[in-house]
Image: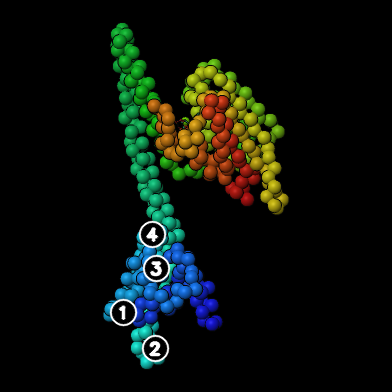
Amino acid sequence: MFFRHIVSGMRNGVLAITRDARLALINDEAYRIFGVAPSPNDGGQPLASVLKDHPDVVRALTGVFDLHHMPARVELRLKPSGKVIGYTLALVRDDGGQVVGASMFFRDLTRVEQIEERERLRDRLAAVGEMAAMIAHEVKNPLAGIEVMAGLLKRKVADVPDAQATLSDIIKEAKMANAIVQEVLDFVRPIRLQVEHTTVREAVQGAIQLADTKARRGNIAITVNVPPGLPEIPADQHQLTQVFTNLLMNAYEAMHGEGHVIVSAERMHVDDGRDGHDEVQVIITDNGPGIPQDVADRVFEPFFTTKPKGSGLGLAIVRKIVDAHDGRLDLKSVPGEGTAIRVTLPVSGASEE
Ligand SMILES: Nc1ncnc2c1ncn2[C@@H]1O[C@H](COP(=O)(O)OP(=O)(O)O)[C@@H](O)[C@H]1O
Ligand SMILES: [Mg+2]
């Protein structure tokens, strides 16, 4: 009886059959992995009927009587669930050495597999990132060349208005391509923070100026509600400015020159069950068209854009930087009313402890 309890509580699946392929033993984990409901009558039943959804398993176990040597360890994907098990087989002999049955000892490898798959994906992404960085870097020089040469040519044909207009377009397009390439570089480059004691106020002010040089604001009014008394945070000033710049640019681009943007910030105390800790929250609100739910689910994905000439990297970069600061991002949007994006940053980050 003691022995049975050991087997039934084991964290591995155990299955045993008699020589006539009837079930002799099955434990809880095996039921769980196979997705079969336990029944007290299972013992003595043909294995093929207890595991009728798993013919591969039945074949593997009953086939063991015909094998001359046992395979070391085998993996099998269970068809109904897609779960992967790793198993070993053994013959069961009586005291006289006669084969009286067979056993299977197995483990659910699905989680292990998922972790491996994630690692493979990470490696692949790293490789793609390196390649993107290389291409972007190579493309930057010729683009700069095009811009410069178009500028030279423009001076040479100063008296041909048609050519002037065309050359201006070429320069504009080259500048735009360059901005996209720069974004790709920002996105794929591994992030290194130069952490200093920074205020959100400085980053927001820097961002408002920077955004004006990169996007058309038109008549959009901007209200800044960032109290001077907010605590300093350990952050990379330059990258934090980039975060708010990207958010402001998106707001401007969404509103097409008319509307209102509010940047507000406040300190929050978070009760974490111990001493608690402080955070600074910055919310950028616009009264633009808003984001429909299906779009909102994807806006932080790299290369997701709804703009004909967008790179789709603005928010991916925002996310990358905020993650590196151990911060959080939330998006709230009501189509037709506007969008609010909240950036929450720890006042004493992991980088300081
Ligand atoms: N404030 C906003 N209002 C409406 N839509 C927005 C806003 N911010 C982001 N979006 C949506 O999210 C998408 C992704 O933004 P982003 O990553 O910055 O890339 P891009 O600006 O190049 O399109 C945008 O194309 C847009 O559809
Ligand atoms: Mg953007």
Secondary structure, mark 2, is loop
Specify the amino acid type for callout 3: Leu
- SS state under label 1: helix
The residue under the point 53% across, 44% down is 324
Q: Amino acid at mark 1?
A: Phe
Label placed on residue 65: 1
Instruction: Answer above or below: position of 150 versus 45.
Output: above
The residue singled out by tag 4 in the image is 80
Looking at this rendering, what residue extends furthest in the top direction? 159
The mark found on residue 57 in the picture is none
| Closer to the eye: label 4 or 2 | 4
User: What's the CA distance linking mark 1 and mark 2?
Assistant: 15 Å
| Residue 94 - label | 2
Marks 2/3 in contact by CB < 8 Å: the verdict is: no
Crowd rating for badge 1 (residues with CA inside 10 Å; few <14, some 14–19, many 20+): some
Residue that badge 3 annotates:
51
Q: Would you say 317 lies left or right of 65 here?
A: right
Mark 3 element type: loop
Where, by quadrant of the figure, is residue 223 drawn? top right
- Say which of marks 3 and 1 sits in front: 3
Q: Name the image colouring.
A: rainbow
Q: Are marks 4 and 1 in contact (CB under 8 Å)?
A: no
Instruction: Give the Cα separation between the discs numbered 2 and 3.
Output: 26 Å
Residue 265's spot in the image, x, y percent?
A: 64, 33
Q: Earlier in the sequence, mark 1 or mark 2?
A: 1
Where is residue 325? Give x, y as percent: 56, 43
* Of the pair 291 and 226, the residue shown nearer to us: 291
> Residue shown at 38%/80% (left/top)?
18
C-alpha span from label 4 to label 1: 26 Å
First of labels 3, 1 by sequence position = 3
